[in-house]
Image (cartoon, helix red, strand yellow):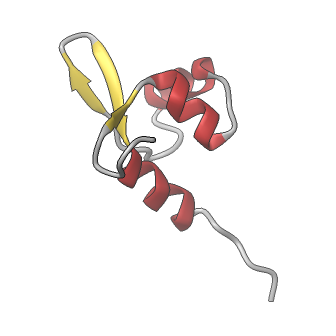
Amino acid sequence: MIANDELMHEEQTAALVGVKPTTLQQWRWSGKYNLPFVKVGRLVRYRKSDVLKWLESRTQTIA
């Protein structure tokens, strides 16, 4: 299991969010969503805590 502060690969992040890795790539390139990521050389990683916060911020409730 990955701790909340550990870095996740793109595939792990895509599975958590429920999209394909290519969708994450498109979001980064277009700036469509403000999902924080970390560049390690040419590699892209995501902090699990950032992804969970991002998901929480997108949660909608019907009034």
Q: Residue furthest right?
A: 62
Q: Is residue 35 left or right of residue 18?
A: left
The residue sitting at 59% across, 41% down in the picture is 16
The residue sitting at 34% across, 28% down in the picture is 45
Question: In which quadrant will I find the N terminus?
Answer: top left
Q: How many marks?
A: 0
Is 43 rendered above or below residue 52? above
Is 61 rendered above or below residue 20? below
Residue 7: horizontal and vertical position, in percent?
A: 31, 35
Question: In which quadrant will I find the C terminus?
Answer: bottom right
Residue 24: horizontal and vertical position, in percent?
A: 54, 28
Q: Is residue 61 left or right of residue 49?
A: right
The residue sitting at 18% across, 13% down in the picture is 41
Q: Residue furthest front?
A: 1
Is residue 30 or residue 5 the one in the foreground?
5
Is 58 rendered above or below residue 37? below
Residue 22: horizontal and vertical position, in percent?
A: 60, 17
Is residue 46 or residue 4 the one in the foreground?
4
Q: Is residue 14 left or right of residue 50?
A: right
Residue 39: horizontal and vertical position, in percent?
A: 24, 24
The residue sitting at 58% across, 21% down in the picture is 21
Q: Residue furthest left?
A: 41
Q: Residue furthest bottom?
A: 63
